[in-house]
Image (cartoon, grey):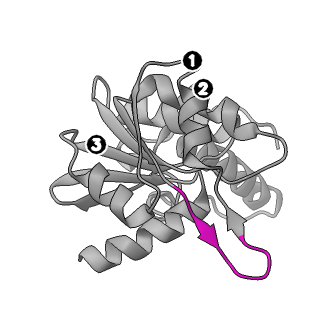
């Protein structure tokens, strides 16, 4: 499939990275349908396809009158896509973030934070540990905060427990809030959000 730009109607209201993904998927389907002598997709089928979303990718929910974005971006590529989508959807808007990053030998989280941090008004760093036999853990919040302070003067605070960190985030004055850095963190936060409802 030749991956050229496909116009996605603005009415689909997709984040920037999903517009790209949708365009590529559309091209692949259109190619196969044409190759196999089938009818092209109808506008209704396109609208239905555009409604499909991946949980934890620019997932927006309303909580306490605020928009809470859940996105598991954890590397430079995903964080760049997230930041581009935030800029497009919420231009000139102050955003506060709650984040935790998974332990990894390659330290890719550092590059991701260099993309994210300049866009945030305030950051709450937390921790997670999931599983028993081979648990997934976050980088220690103090290490994350110390790293951020090497390149930014954004306000950063630590709340080691995710539930309390979420409460601190929701109490912030910003109307757009972000939870990011790890899909493991998102799973933990979603559990706490259910408790709030």
Q: Is residue 78 visible?
A: yes
Which residue shows up at 50% across the image and 19% down it?
152
Q: Which residue is mark 2?
A: 114
Q: Looking at the figure, which quarter contains the N terminus?
A: top right
Question: Decide: marks 3, 1 in contact (CB < 8 A)?
Answer: no
Marks 3, 2: nearer the viewer? 2
| Element at label 3 | strand
Asked where in the image residue 96 lies, by quadrant, the reply is top left
Q: Which residue is mark 3?
A: 176
Which residue shows up at 67% across the image and 62% down it?
137
- Mark 3 or mark 2: which comes first in sequence? 2
- Mark 3 or mark 1: which comes first in sequence? 1
Q: Position of residue 155 (x, y in %)?
A: 37, 29
Q: Position of residue 90 (x, y in %)?
A: 32, 33
Residue stretch rendered in magenta on the structure:
127-135
Asked where in the image residue 19 lies, by quadrant, the reply is top right
Which residue shows up at 56% across the image and 42% down it?
142
Q: Is residue 142 left or right of residue 88?
A: right
Q: Is residue 54 visible?
A: no
Question: Decide: marks 2, 1 in contact (CB < 8 A)?
Answer: yes
| Element at label 1 | loop
Where residue 151 is drawn, which disc sits there? 1
Q: CA distance from mark 2 to mark 1?
A: 8 Å
Q: Position of residue 63 (x, y in %)?
A: 23, 61
- State whether the magenta stretch is mostly helix, strand or loop: loop
């Amino acid at each position: 499939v030749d991956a050229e730009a496909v116009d996605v109607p603005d009415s689909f209201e997709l984040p920037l990275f999903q517009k790209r993904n949708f365009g590529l998927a559309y091209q692949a389907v259109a190619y196969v349908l044409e190759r196999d002598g089938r009818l092209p997709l109808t506008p209704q089928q396109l609208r239905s396809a555009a409604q499909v979303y991946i949980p934890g990718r620019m997932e927006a929910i309303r909580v306490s009158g605020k928009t809470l974005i859940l996105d598991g971006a954890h590397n430079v590529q995903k964080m760049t896509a997230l930041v581009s989508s935030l800029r497009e959807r919420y231009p000139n808007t102050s955003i506060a973030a709650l984040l935790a990053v998974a332990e990894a030998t390659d330290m890719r989280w550092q590059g991701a934070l260099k993309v994210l941090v300049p866009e945030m008004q305030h950051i709450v760093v937390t921790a997670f540990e999931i599983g028993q036999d081979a648990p997934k853990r976050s980088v220690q919040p103090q290490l994350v905060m110390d790293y951020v302070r090497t390149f930014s003067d954004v306000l950063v605070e630590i709340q080691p427990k995710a539930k309390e960190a979420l409460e601190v985030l929701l109490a912030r004055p910003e109307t757009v809030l972000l939870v990011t850095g790890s899909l493991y963190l998102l799973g933990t936060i979603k559990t706490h959000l259910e408790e709030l409802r």
